[in-house]
Image (tube, grey):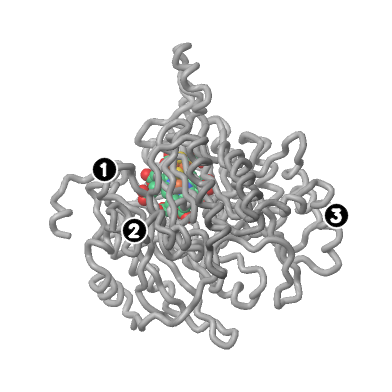
Amino acid sequence: MAETNVKKLSKNETIKENSNFLRGTILEGLADVSTGALSDDDGQLTKFHGIYQQDDRDVRNERRKQKLDKAYSFMARVRVPGGVCTPKQWLEMDRLSDQFANGTLKLTTRQAFQFHGIIKSNLKRTIAEINHACLDTIAACGDVNRNVMCNPNPYQSAVHAEVQKLAEDINTHLTPQTRAYHEIWLDGEKVETTETEEPIYGKTYLPRKFKTVIAVPPSNDVDIFAHDLGYIAIVEDDKLVGYNVTVGGGMGMTHNNQATYPRVAQMLGFIKPVDAIKIAEAVVTTQRDNGDRSDRKHARLKYTVEDMGLDNFRAEVAKRSGVDIEPARDFKFEHMGDRYGWVKGIDNKWHLTLFIQNGRVLDTPDYAMKTALREVAKIHTGDFRLSANQNLVIGAVDDKAKPAIEAILNEHGLMDRLNTSGMRLNSMACVALPTCGLALAESERYLPDLITDIEKILDEAGLREDEIVIRMTGCPNGCARPFLAEIGFVGRSPGKYNLYLGASFTGERVNKLYRDSITHQQVIDELKPILLRYAKERNEGERFGDFTIRAGYVKAVNESKTDFWSDN
Ligand code: SRM
Ligand code: SF4
């Protein structure tokens, strides 16, 4: 680590250092009416406040030709720890999306809401109104611990309450303490800043983003191994006895840069529930002090764990936390993704998981999904739970209330949407174009049509009901966790995608490149023979990802670092 300390710090480190605990000149920038944008440095700082500056890429070229400025607007990401919110909060998010954003609500792959298309003059009011709804955007992005994810787990209600509480507690414990957010967005009183303003993070926060997640086996619906820090609930005799802690997962990589790679998290060991927060803080500070601050492509915890070695990392976390980390206990994941439809919990309440394609809640002429969910929220007395797969659970419904909710959903076609292929129900796409500045290709606007064409093959093969996990992102940052999909697509350039195969159905193994930079028709031509063969030759219960390895299409990635890039 000493070596990394003498390297030149990345530009973001200087921006953070000079920002006066994330204030920068954001207030001045918001007041400047001569432009719809903020300065570049402030654009980096607003991320810590959950806000990204973007521009409409659909009109970028045209505006450039007309010598016009980019069509700037902002995306705001609302933290929802464990994805749980009230019907009243849902109604507020719905209203704000119409009043200040582009009329749609995006349910993200990390159980948050996103608003797109907020113009600068509306930004402050939007953030303030989100806070009035008792939600916030602080630390939804930036080099800090983000929204803590938790299995929405509708059926094991007692355990869910405990793990949900841990998600909220970690969220609170690791939220930045700076008053900047309140001063800028909520007109809070200005206070003298001191070094102790950030007791955990310090002046320069973390080297990179940091993500925490909790899973309750047998469901790995949160993709626990894709995150920096994970807690796998160990339940014995229906009681939560502790957690297996995982560290060093992450998806992002850069095409053709073998120093970068997606990585599944490794097992740190078992801890008691009472030690969970101490461990979170120790992992965060170990990353704070050892992560690479010179190269942002090498700054995530996954590289720190890789560079220190798991044993050294564990020893350091044990020393800092004072926790006795025991050997990991047995557990078994059976699937990733969500289980759809109604299920009754042990609390005797009903929970309904709905399919929200790619998490985009909107009304179209033939499908009034947003209206339907608004009508449900008006009468619902339970909760809404955002899943880690961009879907929605209408939680804690009484026997008596169930028929009215189901009638609304039936009337607007939401229940019908569950009658689609197993592949579509297991699909996810990131936002990509037109708002994401990093997209190399379409994703959310394209995957549904691609699946429609693949469904013709599924019908021919008799695989329509089979659950096959398929995911797409517009670039290799991996926002829809495509490297954990049995069929993964990653944008290369407009209309061209890398095709990855061979991940496991339980989220414990990443996939491997099968074809580089192929078009829509080539995707269909490549997948057809494999799917037809799978239908005929699979072993009893064999999953598609496992089959593609057994049949020799790709090799298994056992050790994500080296095997992902090599021909192992
Ligand atoms: Fe992401 C950056 C969208 C989950 C890895 N991600 C972005 C930005 C903010 C683009 C940017 O930096 O300018 C995207 C905004 C697009 C837009 O217009 O909304 C963006 N990421 C998303 C969301 C909305 C995708 C979605 O369709 O749901 C997800 C929001 C989650 C949330 O609520 O916080 C989202 N991003 C993820 C995930 C999945 C996860 O965490 O489970 C990953 C992979 C896991 C990981 O972190 O390793 C992910 N996003 C990235 C990266 C690559 C990080 C890396 O280590 O290399 C970037 C780029 C970066 O950080 O430099 C990125
Ligand atoms: Fe944008 Fe790439 Fe993330 Fe998709 S994966 S939202 S294209 S950064």
**Disc 3/disc 2 C-alpha distance (Å):** 49 Å
**150 on left or right of 363:** left
Give the quadrant of the N terminus: bottom left
Q: Which residue is mark 1?
A: 14
**Disc 1/disc 2 C-alpha distance (Å):** 15 Å
Cβ of mark 2 under 8 A from ligand 1: no
Residue located farthest toward the top when viewing the structure as drawn? 66
Disc nearer the start of the sequence (3/2): 2
Secondary element type, mark 3: helix
Is residue 225 or residue 6 the one in the foreground? 225
Q: Nearer the viewer, mark 3 or mark 1?
A: 3
Image coordinates for residue 363, horizontal then vertical, percent: 72, 39
Q: Which residue is mark 3?
A: 407
Image coordinates for residue 151, horizontal then vertical, percent: 56, 66
Which residue is rendered at x = 35% and y = 81% of the image?
325
Image coordinates for residue 413, horizontal then vertical, percent: 78, 47
Image coordinates for residue 99, horizontal then vertical, percent: 67, 35
**339 on left or right of 335:** right
**Disc 3/disc 1 C-alpha distance (Å):** 56 Å
Above/below status of 421 relative to 559: above
Above/below status of 444 relative to 530: above
* Label 1 Cα neighbours within 10 Å, binned few <14 / some 14-19 / many ≥20: few
Secondary element type, mark 1: helix
Is residue 100 or residue 499 the one in the foreground? 499
Mark 2: amino acid:
Tyr
Disc nearer the start of the sequence (3/1): 1
Q: Nearer the viewer, mark 3 or mark 2?
A: 3
Q: Which residue is mark 2?
A: 201
Residue 134 in sight from this viewpoint: no
Query: Dots 3 and 1: beta carbons under 8 Å?
Result: no
Mark 3: amino acid:
Ala
